[in-house]
Image (cartoon, grey):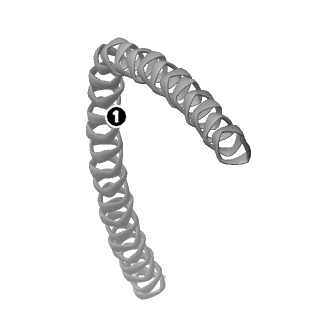
C-alpha cells in the first residue's frame, strides 16, 4: 500500500512539475506578446504625435499659401486684362492699316 501511495505521489509530483513548466512557458509567451504590443503601441503613438505636429505646421503655413494664391490670381487677372487690351489695340491698328491700304 505504501508503494502504491509512493508511486501515485511520484506521478502527482511529476504531473505538477509538468503543469508548472507548461504555465511558465505560457507566461513567457504572454509576456513576450505583451512586450511586443507595448512596442507597437509606442511606435503608433510616436507616429501619431509626428502626424499631429505636421498638421499644426501645415495649418500655420496654410494662410500664407492662401494669400500667395490670392495675389497670384489677382496678378494673373491683371495680366489677362492687359493682354486683352493690347490685343484690342493691335486689332484697331491692323484695321486702320487695312483701311489705309484700301484708300
**Among the 4 quarters of the image, the one containing residue 7:** bottom left
Q: Residue at x 37, y 19 (%)?
A: 62
Residue 91 is left or right of residue 30, and the answer is right
Q: Nearer the viewer, residue 53 or 83?
A: 83
Quarter where residue 85 is shown:
top right
Expressed as whole percent of the image width and height from the top left, the position of residue 57 reads: 26, 23
Give the image location of residue 74, x and y in percent. Answer: 46, 16
Residue at x 28%, y 46% (from the top left corner)? 43
Q: Nearer the viewer, residue 73 or 21?
A: 73
Please determine whether, in this image, residue 14 is positioned above or below residue 32. below
Circle count:
1
- Vertical position of residue 99 compared to residue 2: above or below: above
Q: Quadrant of the C terminus?
A: top right
Identify residue for label 1: 51
In the image: residue 88, left or right of residue 27: right
Up the image or down, 65 lies above or below 45; here it is above
Q: Residues within 10 Å of mark 1 (few under 14, many from 20)?
A: few
Looking at the image, residue 99 sits to the left or right of residue 50; the answer is: right
Q: Residue furthest front?
A: 103
Looking at this view, is 12 or 29 the one in front? 29
Q: Where's residue 98, x and y in %?
A: 68, 45
34 or 49: nearer the viewer: 49
The residue that appears at 55% across and 21% down in the rendered structure is 81
Please tell me which residue is depicted at 42% across the width and 70% down the height of the picture.
19
Mark 1, secondary structure of its residue: helix
Answer left or right for 77 relative to 37: right
Residue 54 location in percent, x, y?
30, 30
Amino acid at each position: 500500500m505504501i508503494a502504491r501511495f509512493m508511486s501515485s505521489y511520484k506521478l502527482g509530483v511529476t504531473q505538477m512539475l509538468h503543469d508548472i513548466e507548461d504555465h511558465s512557458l505560457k507566461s513567457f509567451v504572454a509576456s513576450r506578446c505583451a512586450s511586443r504590443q507595448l512596442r507597437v503601441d509606442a511606435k503608433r503613438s510616436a507616429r501619431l504625435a509626428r502626424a499631429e505636429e505636421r498638421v499644426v505646421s501645415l495649418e500655420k503655413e496654410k494662410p500664407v499659401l492662401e494669400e500667395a494664391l490670392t495675389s497670384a490670381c489677382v496678378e494673373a487677372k491683371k495680366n489677362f486684362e492687359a493682354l486683352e487690351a493690347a490685343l484690342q489695340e493691335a486689332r484697331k491698328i491692323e484695321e486702320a492699316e487695312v483701311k489705309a491700304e484700301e484708300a
